[in-house]
Amino acid sequence: MENEAGALSRVAGLFSARGYNIESLIVAPTEDPTLSRMTLVTVGSDDVVEQIIKQLNKLIDVVKIIDLSDGDHIECELMLVKVRAIGKDRKKIKGTADIFCGRIVDVTGKSYTIELTGTCSKLDAFLDTIERNTILETVRTGASGIGRGERILKV
Amino acid sequence: MGTEELTGAEITIRCLQEEGIDYIFGYPGGAVLFIYDELFKQNKVKHILVRHEQAALHAADGYARSSNKVGVALVTSGPGVTNSVTGIATAYMDSIPMVIISGQVPTYAIGLDAFQEVDTVGITRPCVKHNFLVKNITELAITIKKAFYISSTGRPGPVLVDIPKDVSQEKTKFYYPSSVSMRSYNPTSKENPGQLKKAIQLILGSKRPMIYTGGGVILSNATKQLTNLVQMLNFPCTNTLMGLGGYPATNKQFVGMLGMHGTYEANMAMQHCDVLIAIGARFDDRVIGNPKHFYNKERKIIHIDIDPSSISKRVKVDVPIVGSVSDVLNELIKLLKASKEKNDRAAIKSWWAQIDQWRKRDCLKYDRRSAIIKPQMVVEKLYKITKGNAFITSDVGQHQMWAAQFYKFDKPRRWINSGGLGTMGFGLPAAMGVQFANPKGAVACITGEASIQMCIQELSTCKQYNLPLKIVNLNNRYMGMVRQWQEFFHGNRYAESYVDALPDFVKLAESYGHVGMKIEQPNDIEDALKEAFKLKNRLVFMDFITDQTENVFPMIPGGKGLSEMILV
Ligand SMILES: Cc1ncc(C[n+]2csc(CCOP(=O)(O)OP(=O)(O)O)c2C)c(N)n1
């Protein structure tokens, strides 16, 4: 979409006005600074998704839109988790993070902050694996996505 | 690029001149004072001063609807904008091309809760086709160009341009492009030939066809094409409330308006047809009722609309055709003429026999011998006296439905009403806009005593500009439509629907400098109307004292289907 003030609120406003769901939404400028790329995750029947796409297309700030789940695509989300890490837990948590290819990006005597990327379900799996009560804080970006191979969304 | 340096205010007016705008409707205030100053210095763009910003919007709207030009309104920041919102939303719901210019507090004050500051772009966002806040004077001219372009192309709609006061004061070189293109906005689409072919097959194979058309036919100026198509096929045709005048109402193939207060024959034919051709219409809830009841598995639907999001929104269709109605109809007519196949004449004939059976139900009958004035009779006589040539605006309620049922519109852009939003207060200011667009035309506003009071202050505007409107007030001392629902669905409990403490409308009209008449006898209706229309240069307010208990029939109760009408 156009990298214009207010473009995001037009999209968000459309979803709330028409009663559609936003599961997650992520947006940032592209290599062309006049354009932003948004990945929005929503749920709905085929009819609802068709309406959402048609309605989004009507927004003047939206340049192009595709339904990534129509074909092969890659989905990726970034998560930062701060966990309590004391005593023997420290090793265990480090081990789990390694298995999930996470990086520890901040360390104190009592905590680790782990950076993880991957599909949403992988991040969910990590959270399910570590002990719930060790989690101090999580922050997730929501999924961003791109088509596989020759499937290209470009203006 | 021109060499002169102009202020933002000058640029704004120059842009309007370049667009060929003759009238704008507005109300001044602090944030637009520089723009008003420039208006004062020229005389190409004439400013019409209303008495409330809502009326400025409705007047610009009536101007646009009746003329096929873009309507323009100018309002100040803060309360000027909030007063305009009803008018903007009204135009948005009916897809009317309008450009609204609003003043804003200076850029350096935005966000600081400045005097008369509101988030105009935020408040209007859900009810405009698009809006802009112009923060940089170098963007002003191109933004106004885009506003006109967006509002008048594709599915039309209101576009707002918010101009901070300092931007109207600063200077830059003026250049107005003759055209503009935007990568994110492509209003022209070419209809899909495959779908056209499928449509032709369905049309030619149909035995019980029906053509249902809406405001899109009017907006797309496709009346001629529609008339051709309907007559070459000998199919029945119905119009929505927004589509009246799209097909000549006095033609025998017209089966009346459809929908909640549509005719028996139109609604029955909609329900029982085997091929439905929907043109520039959107299957809205007041038209088809409950989609589950509307569903008929033997019926195939062809849907022609410029807006893809209107297609398969409430009702799944079999053949979607996205494109401008006039282009698509031209194509269809060409293909039909070239086709060797023809419809099964006998089948169409027996379908007409069925429709004529339904017509015999005479669903719009009312007591013509009543001693109290029946509102339907007033509309019938108005039709007769004006020979069907008047521009009719209306407000919202029973009177609106009677106007739609009993005034037979043979031409487009003659019936001006708020169909989508249903805005009481629309009729009088809209009529002002219509009169400015059609200075020689007879313009009547059919209203009710509740609706007319929502913008009654505009009688003053009418005096200032000598607008010879004819106001037909169907005075039943009730918010009649509300009363009707309370009678039918709320056990006759008439909660707050009695319109008490009414003014003496005759004196009221006179105090504004107009002519007032009160009509209480059925026998006086015709003479009063004749007299009023003879007063060519005067606004005449006709207060018809009508039957308080009259109801609009047929009626489809909310949540029901087309064949579940309540009949007289
Ligand atoms: C601004 C606004 N407020 C409320 C309504 C709800 N409403 C619809 S019809 C109606 C009554 C209109 O009464 P009147 O103008 O006297 O017309 P009648 O139905 O009696 O012909 C009301 C209150 C509306 N349509 N618009």
Image (cartoon, coloured by chain):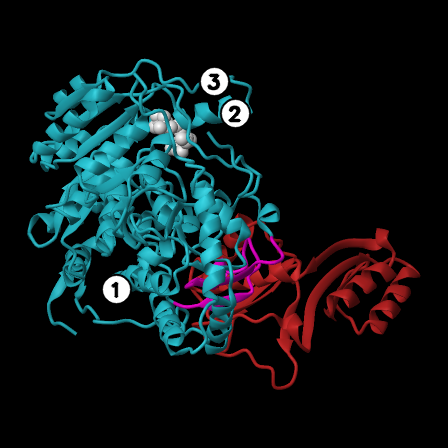
Secondary structure, mark 3, is loop
Residue with the most extreme top position: B501
Tag 1 secondary structure = helix
Chain part drawn in magenta: B296-323
Task: For residue B28, say whether it is visible.
Answer: no
Mark number displayed over residue B145? 1
Disc nearer the start of the sequence (1/3): 1
Look at the numbered discs 2 and 1 and tell me whether their residues touch, using CB distance below 8 Å: no
**Disc 2 packing (10 Å; few <14; some 14–19; many ≥20):** few
Tell me the tag on residue B494: 3
Question: Ligand 1 within 8 A of label 3's CB?
Answer: no
Foreground mark, 1 or 3, reads: 3
Find out whether residue B335 is within the magenta segment: no
The answer to whether B451 appears left or right of B201 in the picture is left
Mark 3, other Cα within 10 Å: few <14 / some 14–19 / many ≥20: some
- Disc 1 residue type (three-letter): Lys
- Residue A37: in sight, yes or no? yes
The residue closer to the viewer here, B234 or B504, is B234
Q: Nearer the viewer, residue B451 or B485?
A: B485
Give the residue type at disc 2.
Phe
Q: Colour of chain B?
A: cyan
Disc on res. B488? 2
- Let me know if marks 3 and 2 both belong to one chain: yes
Q: Position of residue A149 (x, y in %)?
A: 64, 85
Q: Residue furthest front?
A: B346
Question: Who comes first in sequence, dot 2 or dot 1?
Answer: 1
